[in-house]
Image: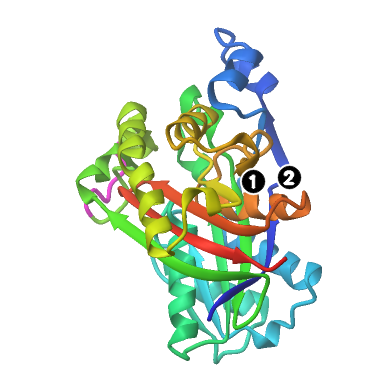
Amino acid sequence: MAYIKAISYYLPETILTNEQLVEEFPEWTVKKVAGKVGVNRRHIAGNDECASDMAIKAAQQLFSEHQVDKSTIDYILFCTQSPDYILPTSACIIQDKLGLNTSCGALDFNLGCSGYVYGLSLAKGLIAGGIAKNVLLLTAETYTKHIHPADKGNRTIFGDAATATLVSTEGFAAIADFSLGTDGSGFDKLIVKTQGCRNPQTANDSSDYLYMDGPEIFNFTLDRVPSLVKTVLAKNDILHEDVDLFIFHQANQYMLDFLKDTLKIDDEKFYGYLSEVGNTVSSTIPLAMYFADKEQVLSGNVVIAGFGVGYSWGGCLLRIKN
């Protein structure tokens, strides 16, 4: 069996508030920004601060906060869509800078809002296969570097963050069964079109920045997430009323409220941590879990679900030891 043993995080020092955004976009109001997306402020990576830098700080916080002996780490999984380089893999750089054993496996995987759930599935597989005993699952994203300065919609939503999760043979949360899915026909609904091998040259226009088709992403979410939750419940042989807490990817407040109402989830069973950090992509779920634990509401049967860019979605059940 695989367990989540510890979670920590890192947030960049620079903060972008709604008041600052309204200074740039006076046609908006602070109340409108907060009401529309549910975010009051978001953390922004520094100009020279990359995803691996943030992941390293999250890992160091994990080691310190939870008294983790870093010599026991035998695998790194790093989820990011903002790698330092096209090659080499950022996980190799992280291994060296953290001073981990050279016998440690290390790889990056490119997923966004479903990335944490997928990372847990990979970590569980490594442990179940006897390949690793202590997997360091890192998430870090600097989406704000992909957003055009004039794109007020996406600038209100996204923030930068990193998290570190230790997945081990023992811990406080047993990782139960998963439901995962992919529909690549929606690949272009959330995309940076240039600077990869398909379109290697910068276009010096909006193609160089993050593009999100908000209405289509919303429709995809409403189509997939309710059935995803039902499948997770069925795979784990539990009923809706047996779930003590639901933690979804923190996309925006409007979408979360819509999903909560659609799935008929009681307010006290639906946890969110969005207003002070924004949508931090693959880091939203572990951030929410960390603070739910601090508030002593992370207990019993917890369903987590991630969904978005790809299209990609995934959910699983966590059984929390009380």
**Circle 1: residue type:** Gly
Residue 101 vs residue 138, the one in the foreground = 138
- Residue 297: x %, y % from top left: 71, 50
- Residue 262: x %, y % from top left: 42, 32
Question: Colour mode?
Answer: rainbow
The residue range painted magenta reads 198-205
Which residue in the protein does label 2 denote? 13
Magenta stretch: residue 203 in it? yes
Q: Residue at x 67, y 31 (%)?
A: 41
Residue 116 vs residue 141, the one in the foreground = 116
User: Nearer the observer, disc 1 or disc 2?
Assistant: 2
Magenta stretch: residue 173 in it? no
- Picture quadrant where residue 23 is located: top right
- Picture quadrant where residue 107 is located: bottom left
Mark number, residue 46: 1
Q: Residues within 10 Å of mark 1 (few under 14, many from 20)?
A: few
Q: How far apart are marks 1 and 2 (CA)?
A: 8 Å
Figure quadrant of the C terminus: bottom right
Q: Which residue is drawn at 54% across and 20% down?
A: 36
- Picture quadrant where residue 136 is located: bottom right
Q: Which residue is drawn at 55% across and 52% down?
A: 243
Q: Can residue 18 be seen in this view?
A: yes
Residue 14 vs residue 77, the one in the foreground = 77
Identify the main secondary structure in magenta.
loop
In the image, 314: left or right of 18?
Answer: left
Labels in figure, total = 2
In the image, 195: left or right of 274?
Answer: left
